[in-house]
Amino acid sequence: MDPRSQRLFGGGRAALGDLTTNPFRADRDRIVSSTFFARLGGVTQVISPGGSGLLVHNRLTHSLKVAQVARGIAERLTADERYTALLDKLGGCDPDVCEAAALAHDLGHPPFGHLGERVLDRLARERLGLADGFEGNAQSYRIVTSTEISGETIGLDLTAAVRVALLKYPWTRRTYPTPHVHLMSPAPRGAATAPDDPLGGSTKFGAYVTELKDLLQARNATRVAVWQQSVEASVMDTADDIAYAIHDVEDFHRVGVLQQGAVATELGAWQRDRTELALDAVPDKRPGGALERLRRDLRRKDSWISDDDAFAAAVEHVRHELVDGLLVAPFDGSLNAEQTVTLFSARWTRRLIDAIEVRPDPPVRSGHVLLAPVQWHEVQVLKFVHRHFVLERPDLALHQRGQARLLGTLVEALHAWLLDPDEADRLPGRLHDLVELAEAESAGLTAADFGTPHAMPDLTAVARGRAIIDFVASLTDGQAVAMLDALSGRSRQLWTDAFVL
């Protein structure tokens, strides 16, 4: 049997619901049929779906577009004779595998987007004593291998190829591989520790210690370095970057947040004053300074590709397409406005997909599949526009601080409920099941597995903590709000479909 089609639990066996004999297409179907995939329609991409109707992407529409881009990349690469031998040497590039991994890559995303990810990680480590904390990519891998139910198995029983393609960061937070990737210089992208927590392990990682055995089984047949993405994971990762860069800019033009004047001032000032800005010790306090800070950060972090001429060309192209193009007229919902947005997105998607390359020996901070230098810089500038003019807004911060407080209160309330001996028989059924699953998983682990070699953690407390995090991370934005309303006594509605207990 092809080791890439080997399943975690069933060998090569098809499941009852499989409608195709192609194992990778069956994986795609299993992912799309998952309740975790359906819930993504109610999970924040950047702002909560309930706050802007159908105008902005949620995690479901984002995942569908990442899958579309990933399949487009894979089909172009496999049709390009220049890469045939190299792709085979590196382990293959199947469009079905890339599409399936892209569909599954955000299954573990918690309520309220990346804010929820940061809050749950802090609560998991500091309040619940989980050395692994929380990480959205690791949670996605946990779902497909452990917490989802698919027919007769725990997890979705995906093939090794798709599980490997899901591993954007193929290491655990602290313990695998040895020596750990955060000790490399330079470290792979995402592997470095947080500046304020040098002993806390990598900031990004692909699996918790409870899923390490599954990770090793999946990567057994890979032909890349132990810390390196597979080609198909690299395709998925690149597709995610492309979709994020384009569609988030598109979203905030639609809702009127991205204003032509502000973007034009920042980009134009940098183009006009870039020589002077480059000499300024603190450029941020003047127009063009934030963009200059980006240029410096790229030079520092990504010297393997960063180039001042390519950066200047990228700023000019983004200015032409965005300031002189998309943002010229406010979005008013007209057919002409819709067409402008559609053409902007289509042009950028085609431009970036056509700029994809495959390298046999990429730098440590890159996968084998990557954008050409000019287009790589364009993506960085597009992401800067989104970050600087949307994510740094005070009104967004206001809502996010409230969402962070909500998640913290919800975790505390569920923890108190779980510790109440008088309520043991009335716990939500799923929370009870998640505790049992976490207890079974942690029973066979050692202190070294947990990254605490000198002291074994309290396994009961660890199981409860992981169960609470699993439970909260599986909620939509609306379910998290409704559950806290009920737990705090603010809701008078007893029977509700906002969540199922």
Image (tube, rainbow, N blue to C red):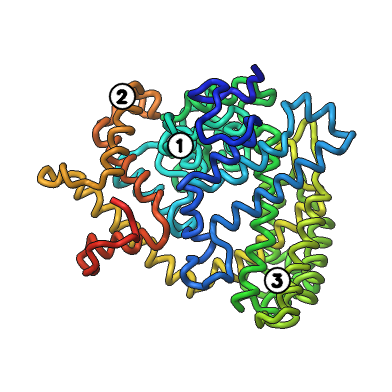
Please tell me which residue is depicted at 62% across the width and 68% down the height of the picture: 251
Q: Nearer the viewer, residue 27 or 163?
A: 27
Determine the secondary structure under disc 1: helix
Which mark is on residue 443? Answer: 2
Assess whether mark 1 and mark 2 are in contact (beta carbons under 8 angstroms). no
Label 1 sits on residue = 142
Question: Earlier along the polypeptide chain: callout 2 or callout 1?
Answer: 1
- Which image quarter holds the N terminus? top right
Q: Is residue 49 left or right of residue 120?
A: right
Please tell me which residue is depicted at 35% across the width and 28% down the height of the picture: 441
Q: Amino acid at mark 1?
A: Arg
- Note whether 304 is above or below 230 in the view shown: below
Q: Residue furthest top?
A: 1
2 or 1: mark nearer the eye:
1
Task: Locate residue 94: give its quadrant.
Answer: top right
Q: Is residue 71 left or right of residue 187?
A: right
Assess whether mark 3 and mark 1 are in contact (beta carbons under 8 angstroms). no
Residue 97, percent across and down?
Answer: 66, 36
CA–CA distance between discs 1 and 3? Answer: 43 Å
Q: Amino acid at mark 3?
A: Gly
Disc 2: CA contacts within 10 A as few (<14), some (14-19) or many (>=20):
few
Residue 344, percent across and down?
Answer: 76, 67
Residue 151, percent across and down?
Answer: 44, 33
Q: Is residue 357 left or right of residue 391?
A: right
Disc 3: CA contacts within 10 A as few (<14), some (14-19) or many (>=20):
many
Question: Earlier along the polypeptide chain: callout 1 or callout 3?
Answer: 1
Task: Locate residue 171: give its quadrant.
Answer: top right
1 or 3: mark nearer the eye:
1
Label 3 sits on residue = 288
CA–CA distance between discs 3 and 2? Answer: 55 Å
Determine the secondary structure under disc 2: helix
Question: Earlier along the polypeptide chain: callout 3 or callout 2?
Answer: 3
